[in-house]
Image: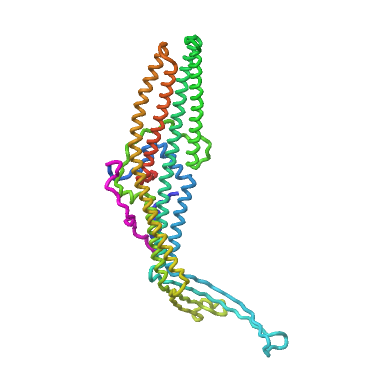
Amino acid sequence: MKVGMAMVAVVLAGCAGKAPDSRIGAVGIATPESWAATPAARAGIDTDWVSRIGGTQAEALVAEAFRRNPDMRVAAERVNRAVAAAKTAGAAIRPQVSAGVNGTRQKQIFVGLPIGNGNGIPSAIFDNFGANLTVAWEPDVWGFRRAGQSALIADAQAEGNSYRAARASLAAQVMRAWLGVAEASEQVALASKTQTLLEATHDIVRERFERALVENGGAAAELRLAESELATNEALMAQRKGEREQAIRQLEVLLGRYPVGLVNGTTVLPEIPPMPPAGLPSELLLRRPDILEAERRFASSASLVRQGRLAFYPSFSLTGSAGTTTDAMSEVLQSEFGVWSLASGLTQPIWAGGRLRDDLARLQSDERSRLAQLQGVVLRALGEVEQALVAERFLLAREKAIVKALKSAEAAVEAASDEYSSGIGDSLTLITAQSNQISLASQRVSLKRLRLDNRITLHLALGGDYRLR
């Protein structure tokens, strides 16, 4: 089901009222000329971020989630409901026309009248048939009803932006689950590779032990340490496989599938794409769907306040009807039996126990609350961008340090292995070096996943929507 702001705009174009003007200027939060975390201020938002990170496979999974995820259908129906409510409110502004026909037969008894022939109580049967056309209209002189519909139009626009946010959020959830499968697969592969390495080390230590190259039981301690490392990695491998199975099932649920663990995910993490354009902080207020949703809620509350003030004004009503009435069905459509009526009215509220005044106070309170909510959303949005930009810088620094440490650890393992094989080194040094290498290799995979996750967070924080091609 495809729902969006364009569809909402088209459907609401025929409404009698109009959408309230933007009130984003009332936020009252000064935005800097550029982001504090980066001097870059290129305009534009990357709407193809799913493809840039995950390629065609990721795009296909996101497209499936859009089609089948139940939460997306719920969000779409909320938009449809809001649009229908706005259109229904417009109907009350127009004249209401109704037509009808009626027919009655009535028997009347004349009790006590001195007539009759002695055969019983006198009576008579009367027939009446008619057709009528009625027009009723309450002219919206002051704009009371138009204000109400304007609020509902703004609510429909807010739901449209909520749908946009839900769509981008679902794309991000699918991408994160997909990356989770990739990381888990890499960790399983790393644990399997480590198992082979530790088995080889265990065999070397065991061979030394059997040849009794170390006196006083030292070789036995080394052998037990090697066995412990091997068993620990077996447990880690089981953990990694379990994490991969859980990640696969989490992805399947997001896709709207039954979680049986059969989804085809990638086995390696993708390369990290270039940084997206950050744009200007002020531009964020005009493109993030959650900010636009909060602004439309605030605009809706302003229309309701206006309607609350107009409730003190008098209301007018006009009613007209025309038709026929006769005692013969065949004469219903004949103009000789026509009847008509016209009526008008004016109602001015005088005293309602303070209800109108209290309603207006409540609506004004809601407006102030919506403004505070909008300001909170704007501040959180600005904070999310700055945090993601800062995180990117420090995650990159951590990754560079880990890569450097991993190279040194690999060299240490190679040296310790050569020394142990030549008989001048000890197994503790070798096992420690291997353990350090394994830990750093696992951290490198996790840091790459964190950078990709943060890149997704940055896309969302910048208001980067995602649209299927």
Vertical position of residue 231 compared to residue 324: above or below = above
Q: Residue at position x 41%, y 53% from top?
A: 160
Find residue 271 and report its image quarter: top left
- Residue 166: image x %, image y %? 43, 47
For the C terminus, the image quarter is top left
| Highlighted range, magenta | 16-39
Given the current orientation, which residue lies at the most extreme front position?
Answer: 216
- Residue 332: image x %, image y %? 53, 77
Vertical position of residue 140 compared to residue 123: above or below = above
Magenta stretch, overall SS: loop
Residue 55 visible to an observer of this rendering? no
**Nearest the camera: 181 or 30?**
30
Residue 164 visible to an observer of this rendering? yes
- Residue 29: image x %, image y %? 32, 52
- Residue 245: image x %, image y %? 50, 33
The answer to if 98 sits in the magenta stretch is no
Q: Residue at position x 40%, y 19% from top?
A: 413
The answer to if 28 sits in the magenta stretch is yes
Q: How many numbered callouts?
A: 0
Colour pattern of the rendering: rainbow
Q: Is residue 215 left or right of residue 409?
A: right
Given the current orientation, which residue lies at the most extreme bottom position?
Answer: 114
